[in-house]
Image: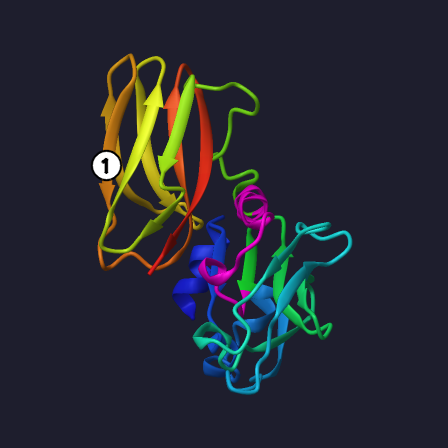
Amino acid sequence: MAQLVAYLNSGHPVYAEGGDFGYSNRTSELWPYFGATYLGDGQPSGTGNVQSLTGETGSLADGLSVTYPYQQSPDSYVDEFGADGGAIVLRSQDNVGRVVSRETPVYRTVLSSTIFGATSGTDCDTLMAAYIDYLLLGTGINQGGTPQPAARTAVVPSVARVGHGVRLETSGPARELSVLDVSGRIHSGWSLPAGEAVTTWNVGTDVAPGAYFLQVRAAGSTVAYPFTVVR
């Protein structure tokens, strides 16, 4: 707990997810830091919890909607959240809060009882980008605005799998590539010369599924490209 508080107070964003995150921490003092309240443990997957998730009006996910594997393994005891100092981001089809965000002058957090890597739909990439933009705004990680340091950048495939390699393709001037998670922690990095180049990130078994992004630094600017890691 003390480490989390110190991490947040030093200006770092935090993204946390997991169906039993709330249940496992229901008596913890961490809830004010996420601006959330734990309302319930949800139902077993045989009964079912989440069919779809819809962005709350005015939230970072406003206008977005994704589907969830109802009555399948990720849908087991999906915790139910309320907002207390934070804001509901996504609600399931039964109007229950499943994702909460909180913004303070020092840090930002997103807490999700659903697993991002299990969602599907045309809005998935947009939702991931919204999470990243929200969490990293003002941290200096995603600075640079509109400048594009690479003429072409791609993560192939866009959904990487633990234990497999993913191609990082870029072109343009000399540049530095880094793979970061949503907390800003660097997992791997490369320095590439000018011109088109391809490198590979071998996704280790210690890499947790979730939202990641490829950060490209070149010509005095930095741009991040989101992608997903799944099991």
Q: Quadrant of residue 51?
A: bottom right
Q: Main secondary structure of the magenta part?
A: helix
Seen at 36% across and 14% down, the residue is 172
Placement of 111 over or under 176, stated as above or below: below
In depth, the one of 172 and 9 nearer the eye is 172
Task: Tell how many labels.
Answer: 1
In depth, the one of 109 and 45 nearer the eye is 45
- How is the protein colored in the picture? rainbow
Residue 74 in the image, given as x and y percentages of width and height: 46, 72
Q: Where does the magenta region start and end? A: 112-134
170 relative to 205 in the view: left or right: right
Residue topped by disc 1: 200
Seen at 52% across and 84% down, the residue is 27
Whether residue 160 is visible here, answered yes or no, is yes
Placement of 60 over or under 56, stated as above or below: above
Whether residue 35 is visible here, answered yes or no, is no
Placement of 149 over or under 187, stated as above or below: above
44 relative to 167 in the view: left or right: right
Does the magenta portion include 42? no
Residue 135 in the image, given as x and y percentages of width and height: 54, 47
Placement of 5 over or under 159, stated as above or below: below
Does the magenta portion include 118? yes
Residue 42 in the image, given as x and y percentages of width and height: 58, 83
Seen at 46% across and 50% down, the residue is 10
Looking at the rendered structure, the kind of residue marked 1 is Thr
Q: Quadrant of the N terminus?
A: bottom left
| Label 1 environment density (alpha carbons within 10 Å; few <14, some 14–19, many ≥20) | some
Seen at 69% across and 65% down, the residue is 85
Indicate the secondary structure of the residue bearing disc 1. strand
Q: Quadrant of the C terminus?
A: bottom left
Residue 225 in the image, given as x and y percentages of width and height: 45, 35
